[in-house]
Image: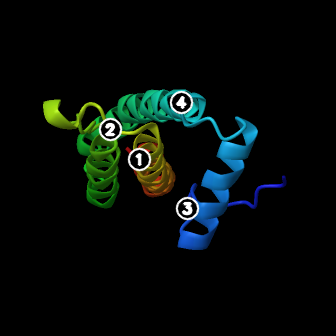
């Protein structure tokens, strides 16, 4: 199956999200347990990307502060807030730990969409930060 390019990094429309979930389940023969394991790997990958983005944007925020590039600093701080929000992991309550694999799969998919969109927005803000920072760095 050919997946379309998502400008925000994840399917934004409900119909596209459903297509993704169905395709993922088909990939694993309808086995929700294996699909949950796959989505766990996707989540780990997204969180690793977010931590890498945080280190790079922190350096940019420091440079922006140092050269007094206020627009860049605001963009960098906004990017930090967005990327940090992807690191939040909601843990199920103890009585809900025996949730069916199907509902766990859907929950992981929703969180994955959110993290993908936030990471993409964070990257976009980092690019804008660099664009606004370049003139200040060369004139400093």
Q: Are marks 1 and 2 in contact (CB under 8 Å)?
A: yes
Percent coordinates x, y for residue 4 in the rendering: 75, 61
Whichever of callouts 3 and 4 sits on the residue coming sooner in the sequence is: 3
Whichever of callouts 2 and 3 sits on the residue coming sooner in the sequence is: 3
Q: Can you tell which mark lies on residue 8?
A: 3
From the image, which quarter does the C terminus lie in? top left
* Nearest-to-viewer mark from 1 and 3: 1
Residue at 72 percent of width and 37 percent of height: 29
Q: Considering depth in this image, is 121 or 64 the residue closer to the camera? A: 121
Q: Is residue 65 left or right of residue 22?
A: left
Mark 2 packing: few (<14 Cα in 10 Å), some, or many (20+)?
few
Distance between mark 2 and mark 4 Cα atoms:
12 Å
Q: Can you tell which mark lies on residue 116?
A: none
The residue under label 4 is: 33
Distance between mark 1 and mark 2 Cα atoms:
7 Å
Mark 3 packing: few (<14 Cα in 10 Å), some, or many (20+)?
some
Distance between mark 2 and mark 3 Cα atoms:
30 Å
Percent coordinates x, y for residue 115 in the rendering: 43, 47
**Image label count:** 4
The residue under label 1 is: 103
Whichever of callouts 2 and 4 sits on the residue coming sooner in the sequence is: 4
Q: Are marks 2 and 4 in contact (CB under 8 Å)?
A: no
Q: Are marks 1 and 4 in contact (CB under 8 Å)?
A: no
Q: Considering depth in this image, is 65 or 92 the residue closer to the camera? A: 92
The residue tagged with tag 1: helix, strand or loop? helix
Distance between mark 3 and mark 4 Cα atoms:
28 Å
Distance between mark 1 and mark 3 Cα atoms:
25 Å
The residue tagged with tag 4: helix, strand or loop? helix
* Nearest-to-viewer mark from 2 and 3: 2
Distance between mark 1 and mark 4 Cα atoms:
11 Å
Q: Residue furthest left?
A: 94
Place residue 75 in its image quadrant.
bottom left
């Amino acid at each position: 199956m050919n997946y379309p390019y998502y400008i925000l990094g994840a399917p934004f429309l409900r119909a596209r999200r459903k297509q993704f979930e169905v395709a993922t389940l088909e990939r694993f023969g309808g086995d929700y347990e294996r699909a949950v394991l796959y989505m766990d790997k996707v989540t780990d990958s997204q969180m690793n990307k977010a931590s890498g983005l945080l280190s790079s944007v922190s350096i940019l925020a420091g440079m922006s502060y140092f050269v007094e590039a206020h627009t860049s600093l605001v963009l960098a701080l906004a990017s930090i807030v967005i990327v940090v929000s992807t690191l939040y992991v909601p843990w199920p309550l103890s009585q809900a730990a025996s949730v069916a694999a199907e509902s766990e799969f859907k929950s992981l998919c929703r969180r994955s969409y959110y993290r993908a969109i936030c990471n993409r927005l964070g990257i976009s803000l980092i690019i804008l930060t660099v664009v606004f920072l370049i003139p200040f760095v060369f004139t400093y």
